[in-house]
Image: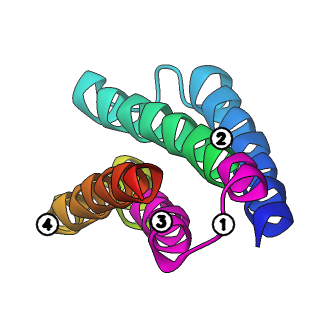
Amino acid sequence: MAKLFICLGSIIMGLAVVIGAFGAHGLEGKLSERMMKNYQTGVQYHMIHGIGIIAVGLLAMKMATNGLLTGAGLSFLIGIFLFSGSLYVMALTGITKLGAITPIGGLAFIIGWVLLALAAIR
């Protein structure tokens, strides 16, 4: 499981760089300031939680893998998809109703961090 999370986290980080570069160079002047901010927030959280997934993998190499650690990694992955993904789609399409999905992704991030803390305590 450790290698899987490190591999997934690395791929996710590569995608975050590509998506961020696309936003900085390909979308400049094409989105409203508000939508560009949403897009940038998606990239920021995407990157932070990509690093979190790599950290889960590294910790899994040092600690006994348990459901809490696996749950943390999966929660980060779900959070990236729902939080960052909804912000990307909303910024690119202008469909603001997708903003209703974003807090669910944020909740997944919070759950991931709590699970990671609990895994470290045990």
Q: CA distance from mark 4 to mark 2?
A: 22 Å
Distance in Å between CA atoms under marks 2 and 1: 29 Å
Mark carried by residue 43: none
Looking at the picture, tell me which residue is in the foreground, 95 or 122: 122
Please, which residue is most extreme toward the bottom here?
A: 67
Q: Nearer the viewer, mark 3 or mark 4?
A: 3
The residue that mark 4 highlights is 100
**Distance of label 3 from label 4 (alpha carbons):** 14 Å
Q: Secondary structure at mark 1?
A: loop
In the rendering, at what x and y percent does residue 10 appear? 80, 47
As measured in the structure, the alpha-carbon distance from the residue carrying label 1 to the one carrying label 3 is 27 Å
Q: Considering only order in the chain, which callout, 4 or 3, is on the residue closer to the N terminus?
A: 3
Separation of marks 4 and 1 at Cα, in angstroms: 37 Å
Q: Amino acid at mark 1?
A: Ala
Identity of the residue furthest to the front in this view: 122
> Does 46 sit above or below residue 7?
above
Query: Which of disc 3 and disc 2 is earlier in sequence?
Result: 2
* Residue 12 left/right relative to 110: right
SS for dot 4? helix
For disc 3, the marked residue is: 81
Task: Identify the element where label 3 is drawn.
Answer: helix
Which residues are the magenta region?
57-80
Q: Looking at the image, is mark 2 or mark 1 earlier in the sequence? A: 2
Q: Which residue is mark 1?
A: 64
Q: Foreground mark, 4 or 1?
A: 1
Q: Secondary structure at mark 2?
A: helix
Which residue corresponds to the image point at 32% horizontal and 27% vertical from the top-left? 37
The residue indicated by pointer 2 is 16
Q: Earlier in the sequence, mark 1 or mark 3?
A: 1
